[in-house]
Image (cartoon, grey):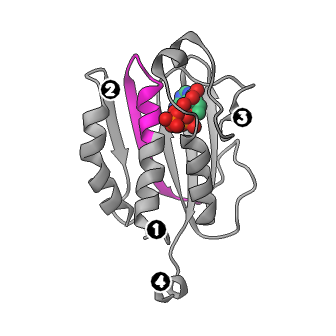
Amino acid sequence: SLHQIIREITKQLNEMLSEKHRLLIDIPEGIPPIFADKDKVRQILTNLLSNAIKYSPNGGQVALIVRELRKVPPGAPPLPNERSVIIAVRDQGMGISEEDLPKLFTRFFRVDNSTTRKIGGTGLGLSITKALIELHGGRIWATSTLGRGTTFWVTLPIATELARRG
Ligand code: ATP
Ligand code: MG
């Protein structure tokens, strides 16, 4: 259950937030369970949310929005033809240039500017996150406006009766 996983990571997240950030969590009560390893999903969400916080040094809203996928959002890659949930992690931070967007999921890639140099990191978080998501049959991509903010989109397959029974 995504509800349970999100409940478990909120304490840790609240500790990362500065006074300038607001955390918004929007997940419908009736969202179906997903078929995934709980610890891995926790890692996926923590990576994306910690990036959202890290790369919005001036604060603003950090939102985690979960929906059942009904309509494919603009900018999405081809998606598996499977019932899925879609998770958006959205920030109002520094944003990412059009040129850097395709490189984000490459190992050790970091956007290089004076702000990111101060923030620090290894550039591994997103490549690991992408691998974990794809192991679950999901997809990840990002949309962004430089100077305005970024949204990371994740799909994960909904648990079917069959999968749940193994
Ligand atoms: P770490 O391995 O500690 O996560 P990292 O945060 O630098 O290091 P990634 O999480 O893989 O590495 O992110 C890669 C790069 O993508 C970052 O260095 C940053 O330049 C950019 N980036 C990631 N998330 C965001 C975001 N929400 N807003 C703006 N830039 C981002
Ligand atoms: Mg990171």
Number of the label disc, if any, that sits on residue 25: none
In terms of sequence position, does the residue under pointer 2 or pointer 3 come before the other?
2
**What is the three-letter code of the residue carrying label 4?**
Arg
Q: Relative to the observer, which residue lies in front, 60 or 109?
A: 109
The tag earlier along the polypeptide, 1 or 4, is 1
Q: Earlier in the sequence, mark 1 or mark 3?
A: 1
Whether residue 63 appears in magenta in the rendering, the answer is yes
Whether ligand 1 has any atom under 8 Å from the Cβ at mark 2 is answered as: no
Give the CA separation, mark 4 to mark 3: 35 Å
Name the kind of residue labelled 3 in the image.
Lys
In the rendered view, does 48 fall on the left or right side of 24? right
The secondary structure type at the circle numbered 1 is: loop
Q: Residue shown at 35%/45% (left/top)? A: 25
Residue under label 3, please give it.
Answer: 103
Between the C-alphas of marks 2 and 1, the distance is 29 Å
Q: Residue at x 31, y 50 (%)?
A: 9
In 3D space, how far apart are the residues under numbered discs 2 and 3 (Cα atoms)? 27 Å
x%, y% of residue 27?
38, 54
Can you tell which of label 1 and label 4 is closer to the viewer? 1
Instruction: Return the x and y of residue 2 as percentages of the image width and height.
Output: 38, 61
Residue named by callout 2: 21
Residue at 70% in and 27% down: 100
Q: Image quadrant of residue 18? A: top left
Q: Which residue is mark 4?
A: 164
Could one spot residue 150 in this view of the protein?
no
Which mark sits nearer the N-terminus, 2 or 1?
A: 2
Q: Relative to 80, does residue 114 appear above or below in the rendering?
A: above
For the residues labelled 2 and 4, the Cα–Cα distance comes to 38 Å
Q: Any mark on residue 37, and which? A: 1
> Circle 2 sits in a helix, a strand or a loop, which is it?
strand
